Amino acid sequence: MKLSSILVSVLCVIAITSVSAKELAGATPKQNLACSSPYWQADSIVNVYFVRQMFTTEQRHALLEAMRAAEETRKRLGLAVTFAFAGETDGLVDCDSCLTVARQDFHPNNRKSRVTLNPLRHNDLGQLISAWVGIDRAADSVVVLSGSMLDTLRRVRGTKVLPACKS
């Protein structure tokens, strides 16, 4: 009985997964995930602003340290985009090559997301012109803050346009 049920299962899997050459030829390719993620134009110098009074002195230092680590990675790997601290601001800054770092409220049950990247403007190619990063207000640990910042900077690093991304 076990052998027959295993054989039936294997035959079902083979029948489901077999695709004819004709079906493959007409299939549309999946979008490259790197293309759907926002990124800065190659060789950009992105001015990073922190919203005033949203971070303690210790937290600001942790965010700046994350930016220094991102810059070291950029130099070591020869990446295209530089992030430069531009100071503090009273609110979101929407200018060419600007990134504002602020606090954001997240739903208490949302344990996956501690940070979001929120584009303000894109160019015609979909590259970021201006954006803001929202870091969970509940995240007060400097380790979490610096890790979130570093991860965000790494995700939006500029790249050359990939052939699969061209429209």
Image: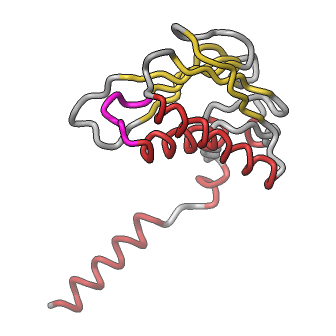
Q: Is residue 104 left or right of residue 4?
A: right
Residue 69's x, y, as percent?
66, 47
User: What's the residue at 72%, 32% (across, down)?
Assistant: 83
Q: Quadrant of residue 24?
A: bottom right
Location of residue 38 (image quadrant): top right
Q: Is residue 63 left or right of residue 106?
A: right
Quick check: can you spot residue 28? no
Query: 162 and 55: which one is in front?
Result: 55
Q: Nearer the viewer, residue 149 or 25?
A: 149
**Could you say where residue 57 lies in the image, as x and y percent from the top left?**
48, 29
Residue 55 drawn in magenta:
no
Looking at the rendering, the stretch of residues picked out in magenta corresponds to: 135-141
Instruction: Give the vertical position of 35 relative to 41 (above or below).
Output: below
Task: Estimate the x, y position of residue 89 in percent, counting from the top left.
Answer: 57, 11
The residue shown at (39%, 37%) is 114
Q: How is the image coloured?
A: secondary structure
Magenta segment, prevailing SS (helix, strand or loop): loop
Residue under the point 37% across and 31% down = 136
Any part of residue 108 in sight? yes
Looking at the rendered image, the quarter that the C terminus falls into is top right
> Which residue is drawn at the image coordinates 68% and 32% (left, top)?
39
Q: Quadrant of residue 45?
A: top right
Q: Is residue 149 left or right of residue 85?
A: left
